[in-house]
Image: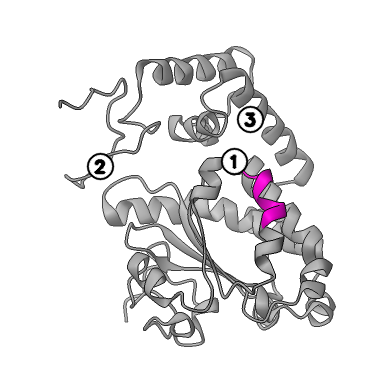
Amino acid sequence: MATQASASPMPAGVTDPNYKPLPGRLGNLTIPQQHALDTLRKQLQDEGLFVPERMDDATLLRFLRARKFDVEKAKAMIVSCEQWRKDFGVDALWNFDFKEKAAVDKYYPQYYHKTDKEGRPLYIERLGLLDIKALYALTTPERQLQRLVHEYERFLRERLPACSAAVGHPVETSCTVLDLANVSLSNFYRVKDYVMAAASIGQDRYPETMGKFYIINAPWAFSTVWTFIKPWLDEATVAKIDILGSGYKDKLLAQIPAENLPKEFGGLCNCPGGCSLSDAGPWNPPKAE
C-alpha cells in the first residue's frame, strides 16, 4: 500500500537517507495537522505572542502534539509557558553556575551522558544515592530547580542540535535512566516536592521531549507508588516508561550502546573523573590534543 504523502516537507538538514519522521513531525503531517500548525503560528504572530528564536515549527509541533493538535489548548500552553519563563527568570539562567555540582553529584547524581542507539541524549538520575541531609547542606531545592531548567535549555539549544547533526536527522527527545537502587520511601517523601516540581516543569514547559524512560532497580514497593502516579500521566507517556527490577542490563543494552552506558549499569564506559561529571556527548566533542 502506498504511503500517504505528508502535507509538510522534510525538515532542513536531513542527511540520513533512511530517516522516516514519526507522525505529527515535520515531514509527516496530515493536512489537518499542517493546518493546525499554520493556524497556531498565525494566531501567535497576530496576537504579538510569537517569539521567533524559540517558536520554530518543530517546537510549535511539540506543543500541538502535547494537546492532540487542539490549537486553542496548545496556544494556552505556550502562553502559560511564556509567562512561567518570565516568572522563573529562565533567560537569566543560561549562564547559571551550579558551582556545587561536583559535591552534589556524590549525593544525587543527575547528568547527561552520550547517546542511545537512536542518537538521543542519555539522561541518568540516581535517586538511590540520595542523602537529604548532606544534599541540603550543599544546595537548596530552588537552586536544584534552576539547575534543572538550565540543563533543559542546554538540552534544546545545544544537545539536541549536536545529536541531530551527528545522526543526520532531527533528534527531539531524550532517553532517561532513573536508578532507584536502595531508595527508601522516607527519603523519597522528603524530596517529593522537588521531584513533583521537576516533573511538572518537564511535562508543562518542555513537552514531548521524553523519548524512552527506564526505571531500574525498582523496589517491590514501587508498584504501589506507580499505581498512584500512573493515572496522572497520559497514555502516550505511560507507553514510553519501562519499569525494571535488578535484571535490567539486557533491556538497557538493547537501547544503549555498551560503549556509551556507564560501567555501573552494565556498560563499558568509564570516563576519566567519572561519567556523571564528564558531560560527554556530541554536544561536547573531545578537544584536539
Magenta-tinted stretch: 227-234
Q: Is residue 242 visible?
A: yes
Within 10 Å of disc 1 (Cα), the crowding (few <14, some 14-19, many 20+) is few
Residue with the mark numbered 2: 14
Sequence-wise first label, 3 or 1: 3
Q: Which residue is mark 1?
A: 234
How far apart are the two marked residues, 1 and 2, measured between alpha carbons? 31 Å
> Which color scheme is applied?
one colour
Query: Helix, strand or loop at disc 3?
Result: helix
Q: Secondary structure at mark 2?
A: loop
- Residue 78 image label: 3
Single out the mark in the foreground, 1 or 2. Answer: 1
Closer to the camera in the image, 222 or 126: 222
Q: Quadrant of the N terminus?
A: top left
In which quadrant will I find the C terminus?
Answer: bottom left
* Label placed on residue 3: none
Image-quadrant location for residue 225: bottom right
Amino acid at circle 3: Ile
The dominant secondary structure in magenta is: helix
Front: mark 3 or 1: 1
User: How far, Cα to Cα, is label 2 from label 3?
Assistant: 27 Å
Q: Amino acid at mark 2?
A: Val
Outermost residue toward the top?
46
